[in-house]
Amino acid sequence: EKGGYDYFMLKEIAEQPKAVADTLLGRIDEAGRLTLDEVRIPDHVLREVDKVVIVACGTAYHAGMIAKYAIEHWTRIPCETELASEFRYRDPILDQRTLVVAISQSGETMDTLMALRHAREQGAKVLAICNTNGSTIPRESDAVLYTHAGPEVAVASTKAFLTQLVACYLVALYLGQVRGTKWGDEIRSVIRELSQISTEVEKVLGTMEPVRELARNLADKNTVLFLGRHVGYPVALEGALKLKELAYMHAEGFAAGELKHGPIALIEEDLPVVVVVPSPRGRSVLHDKIVSNIQEIRARGARTIVIAEEGDEAVVPYADHLVRIPATPTLLQPLVATVPLQVFACELATARGNEVDQPRNLAKSVTVE
Ligand code: M6R
């Protein structure tokens, strides 16, 4: 049932182009508009929403962090993303106009379930983004958007993450569509790009051999750092989480702007640092800032592993290893930038002799708080 792959994780990484296409299936009409009738929250209620709060754990939380950028940009509704395990304990401010989005692959994560129960008690509407039909979280929510990734068996989440991202973009774009914002043209063009994104993910998968080779060469390292900015920051966190859970290595993700506020002190000779570079076209200021971060850490001896868009020449002089990803709209970049990090972690785990599908101490769904 692993379909010829050594591990479910490898199979699930390879299934991502199809999974992403399946999340979109039937949700974009011929005119290029989103049709999310299955989300049974009426449009007039969505128009009234004045705050979005996303709750999730682990990888799903990283998807939620990215969703915040998308929702605030396309809808101008304030959005916060919070670890489900922290949420109810701080007595959050919620009411009928708050939309709470609970993201969960399994639909059984207790922390997330308790957070959404708390939200509903306060009168908030809850929308679940979930991969498992009929599981507890969607059953207890007001509405659900299924990710349709198919069963994910490996403990480390891969295709579920990419499809959670797509579902989050759909929610953000749909809210933008229903409410009408100044980004109408951008929303239409992003919907078009999103409908092509599965091909881009496929392209990335076809170029992963150098990433595997690099991972094998780093198998005896103790620490790997990950840097990113904007939506690349949660991608960096996700890359670090994958490495912790699979390779049992010390790995940390940082917002690159924080480097000089502390983490740069960690840089030493030959320390591998993965940098997720924003597009030079979109947020070009951020791009230039991150290029100087790469210069700074390299001058201090770091071994730089740079993930950058096709055609971004500015990074070339400072990259010890360069991983190319296709050009995408800024907010969609995580869909292509995460893939090399999944492959990297999987290969490192294999090289270190770890059990890829069942990492030590972890369970696929965490049903206790
Ligand atoms: O089933 P869920 O999406 O609610 O699970 C949340 C986390 O437990 C999960 O994403 C975990 O972090 C993964 N093992 C990460 O690969």
Image (tube, rainbow, N blue to C red):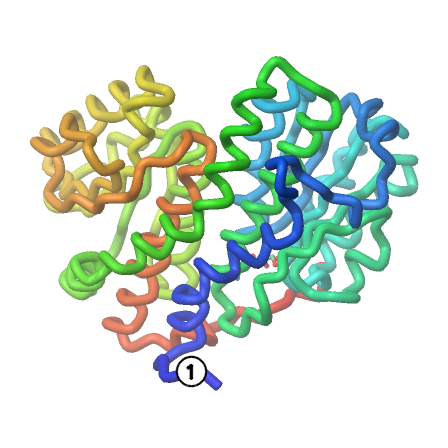
| SS assignment at label 1 | loop
The 10 Å Cα crowd at callout 1, few under 14, some 14 to 19, many 20 or more, is few
Query: Seen in the image, is 123 located left or right of residue 300?
Result: right
The vertical placement of 296 against 232, above or below, is above
In the rendered image, which quarter is residue 89 located in? top right
Front residue of 270 and 69 = 69
Query: Residue 349 appears at what percent x and percent y?
Result: 31, 69
Ligand 1 quadrant assignment:
bottom right
Front residue of 362 and 279 = 279
Query: Residue 65 appears at what percent x and percent y?
Result: 55, 37
Query: Seen in the image, is 135 located left or right of residue 152?
Result: right
Taking the spot 57% from the left edge, 27% from the top edge, the residue there is 187
The vertical placement of 3 against 231, above or below, is below
Tell me if the residue at label 1 has its CB under 8 Å from ligand 1: no
Taking the spot 38% from the left edge, 42% from the top edge, the residue there is 236
Q: Amino acid at mark 1?
A: Gly
Q: Residue at label 1?
A: 3
Front residue of 106 and 16 = 16
Task: Confirm whether residue 95 shows in the render.
Answer: no
Taking the spot 61% from the left edge, 50% from the top edge, the residue there is 57
Query: Seen in the image, is 115 located left or right of residue 355?
Result: right
The quarter of the picture where the C terminus appears is: bottom right
The vertical placement of 318 against 241, above or below, is above
In this view, the residue farthest toward the front is 30
Query: Residue 260 appears at what percent x and percent y?
Result: 29, 22
Query: Residue 111 appears at what percent x and percent y?
Result: 71, 53
Taking the spot 27% from the left edge, 38% from the top edge, the residue there is 275
Task: Confirm whether residue 324 shows in the render.
Answer: yes
Front residue of 156 and 159 = 159
